[in-house]
Amino acid sequence: MDEAGPPAFAVRLRGVLRARLVRPRRLDPRISVVPLRRSLLMRLLAASALVSVCSVIVTAWVVSQTTAVALGGEQGQALADEAHVYDSLVGYAATHTSWSEVQSTVERLGRQAGHRVVLTAEDGRILADSAPERGHVFQPPPKATAVVNPLSVSAQLATAPGADGVQVPGTAGSAASVIDSRVVGPFELSAQETRRLRVLAGRVARCVHEVAGVQARVQLLPSGRPRVIVPGVDDYGSIVTGPCAGSILNKPVASETKPLENLNSLVNSCLRHLSTGTVTLEITGGWTPHGTPAPSDDAVSSCLATSRAQQLAPYVAPGALLYVDSNSRTAKTFFDLSAANRLRIAGWGAVVLVVTVIVTSLAGVRLARPLRRLTVAATRMEDGDLTARVPVRGRDEVARLAAAFNAMSERREKLEILRRDMTNDIAHELRTPVSNLRGWLEAVEDGLARPDADFVTSLLGQALQLQHIIDDLRDLSAAEAGELRLSRAPVRVAELLLSVVTAGRAAAAPAGVSLRSEADPTIMVLADPVRLRQMVDNLVSNAIRHTPAGGTVTLRADVEHHDGPDHHDTGRQRHEGRTVVIDVSDTGCGVEPAELPHIFDRFWRAEKSRNRRSGGSGLGLAIVRRLAEAHGGSVTVTSTVGSGSTFTLNLPL
């Protein structure tokens, strides 16, 4: 049935809209006049001024803290003269489990340094005093000179070689470690193990000298484990291989095996709390990651430090507070907050403020111009002008925003065209059965037709066609809205294809088309049987309509392995692993290559005429695509003009 022409008021409305679009547009006053308090430029200026003021305030605060920094520096310099006091006490704590016998050590250190040395527990109890005063209880100052804890070495006072820190006991590691290397704990080697490793290390050092011409030496670590030191090279194995590699030195001995396993267990327990993979620690300080996601170096280092402190805590003395009396030293400041310096700070602050405002103003003007164009274009689009576009200049964020706006505008224009076409298609599809029903019913009412069996059958056919179109639209809308419910069950694909062929022969026989199926009877797929039958029925019906008399429609099923994207896959899905592939091939006229990307669109027809000669509602293939996506699969098509088409349904096992 031909479509009715547009009413007169629609023609007039179209003329008015066309004249409005062609006529020069006056800029919306809401866009041309923006209050200063809401202007983007003013906001940028206010933000820059705030940043500048904060910068000036921070600068003044930093200068005001100069005196405190100077005092800290003087205190550090004073403590540098007595660094051996701190280092000696750290070494004592690293090799003792308590402070019960530290008094003699403190007295000796006080005499050597020429200062009073007092060691107290964290609760204030005095552990040792190099020069106690009779009748006077020691009153500690508000801040201790240092905290003596071999598991947390002070970076400021750790000047002795024994405080360089290690990652794994027995080997030198990162300088960022805070655990003193003299804390050996369970990693201490026996004398026999040390002698054996020293002999091996000596051989490696001599081999390095003979092969590479580099003078190497052997260093004995506090645990008794030796290591080979090559001047200027952190890892001698990186320059010497073969007989000089000394791989035996990089393996734990018998006494180190169990402690290393315990440490590895603690580290991996920490990493599992961080939801990362695990590592295998090496006695040399390195590690090998396992699992996914692989743990980062920072995560491993953090867990390693925590685990080592937990493992070594029973082998060291508890933390203590160190007080060194250095009254002979006076602090000196290196900056004077005089009037001249204050004026200099204020001057530079004003310069920073002016420069910031100027630069921000220029940047704001440059930024506001394209944003203004975007706002004007958005207003045009709001008024109904779907052709609104903005020029794209540069590659910054605003240019990307303009490109995104143009893409959105173009997409909206296409969607509006599709919406109008879809409305016309729906009206066209529903008009024929509704008009037929109305015409026959009016004929009965006027006495021009008799409601006999043939008449009722004809009306029922029209009603079924109308119901079919409505059901197709309902299924498609539910699938697109994600509200389609699937009742999955194991389905034998061969039996389903055979039933489709048997039912389809009723429509294929009058058209002179033969149907056949080829499938392995053992193929099973987990799918909704009703929806799977609906997909295959739609593909077969479409193939029958586009296959001339004497042609053949073939259904095949197989199991394939996909490791890449499918061609012409409108679902844009990538199938990996084993999938069930159902092919529906015909020997029809085929589809032009330019039409393939649109073949699964709503109301698309290879035949552009609207005489419905090929039948169908134009929704079958769109429904197939949505149902396939609901099953986690996809549908694809390949076609050769004049030879036929093949629709492939991919469903995961």
Image (cartoon, rainbow, N blue to C red):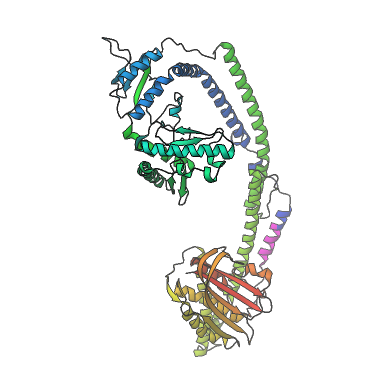
Q: Is residue 2 magenta?
A: yes
User: x, y percentage for residue 270?
Assistant: 39, 43
Which region of the structure is painted magenta?
A: 1-17
Q: Quadrant of the N terminus?
A: bottom right
Q: Count up the numbered dots.
A: 0
Nearer to me, 196 or 130? 196
In this rendering, is residue 566 above or below 51?
Answer: below
- Residue at image coords 27%, 9%: 134
User: x, y percentage for residue 430?
Assistant: 57, 74
Q: Is residue 601 magenta?
A: no
Nearer to me, 459 or 445? 459
Outermost residue toward the right? Answer: 23
- Residue at image coords 46%, 27%: 161
User: x, y percentage for residue 321?
Assistant: 35, 22
Lateral position of residue 123 relative to residue 445, left or right = left
Lateral position of residue 297 relative to residue 409, left or right = left
Nearer to me, 554 or 443? 554
- Residue at image coords 43%, 39%: 197
Lateral position of residue 599 relative to residue 86, left or right = right
- Residue at image coords 40%, 36%: 195
Nearer to me, 134 or 194? 194
- Residue 433 visible in the snapshot: no
- Residue 395 visible in the snapshot: yes
